[in-house]
Image (tube, rainbow, N blue to C red):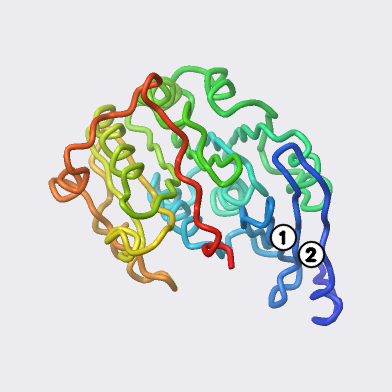
Amino acid sequence: MARSRTSRRERDAVAVVEPVDGGQARLVADRDRARAWTLLIDGAPQSHVDLDDPTYLSFEYQRRLGHVVDLAAPRGKPLQVVHLGGGAFTLARYVAASRPRSTQQIVERDARLVQLVRRELPLDPGARIRVRSADARDGLGKVPEGWADVVMADVFSGARTPAHLTSSEFLDEVRRALKPGGLYAANVADGPPLAHLRGQIATVAARFRELALVADPAVLRGRRFGNAVLVACDLPLPIAELTRRAASDPHPGRVEHGRSLLDFTGGAAPVTDASAVASPAPPPSVFE
């Protein structure tokens, strides 16, 4: 595919701005990559996409989700993946490029955002990606039982994960959609005192036999607000390789698992539909 010859100065001025259901969407051209864009909603960065190289993952939490995809099956093997939350379809593009012939479903509630992304950042027409505009939990309920090798949750509304996507009952739907031994991965955002993150770990631990957490050490120490990736399965996880990959990232991450991860919850109780609340809003300084 031919690369754009737009100058850096021209690219610095390029942006696509329009209202979507979740607020004001802004697609900003990457200064350093010819056909790459960052999607922001109401000023909060949501996704980064490089149309020339869909395997390039700029955001650190998306790189960690990419590691999960890489380790879910032998290299190149097609997967069946459900993406809860679409953004700019970054992870679906990654799976399609790294594992050709994969079949994927994206569930994204914001219909106008889906239209914007399809128009400005079109998917490869050969990719087997279906996009459904629906609530994430409702869309998950329509996935056939035992269909997915991987379910990834990266859902934010106003920079917060909705309460109904944080509960044990939600995870029951995740388990129903997964194949035996399938992987669940979720992007969890939190800051000090990490009460939301601790509750999510306890909730996942109550539904899956094995789990791991990948995050910036400063986030785990409660020093700043940030993203953590929770990974869960009923089979042993590839902890050693996940640890190696996370440590070698441009922004190194730490992997917690086993007893130390359960101890990290500090006795937090699993979340239910009755007790669930949305994840905390990030402080304004996070996006400055």
Q: Three-letter amino acid code at disc 2?
A: Met
Crowd class of label 2 (few under 14; some 14 to 19; many from 20; radius 10 Å): few
**Percent position of residue 97, x then y:** 61, 53
Q: Is residue 56 above or below residue 262?
A: below
Residue 14 position by quadrant: bottom right
Circles 2 and 1, Cβ within 8 Å, touching? The answer is yes
> Which residue is located at x 48 percent, y 39 percent?
152
**Percent position of residue 60, x then y:** 48, 62
Q: Is residue 193 visible?
A: yes
Q: Judge by depth and name the residue closer to the eye, 122 or 286.
A: 286
> Which residue is located at x 27 percent, y 32 percent?
234
Q: Three-letter amino acid code at disc 1?
A: Leu
The residue to which callout 2 is attached is 1
* 139 displayed left or right of 166: right
Crowd class of label 1 (few under 14; some 14 to 19; many from 20; radius 10 Å): many
* 2 displayed left or right of 94: right
**Percent position of residue 251, x then y:** 42, 71
* 10 displayed left or right of 71: right
Q: Earlier in the sequence, mark 2 or mark 1?
A: 2
Helix, strand or loop at disc 1? loop
Residue 33 position by quadrant: bottom right
Q: Is residue 184 above or below residue 15?
A: above
The residue to which callout 1 is attached is 51
Q: Is residue 36 above or below residue 274?
A: below
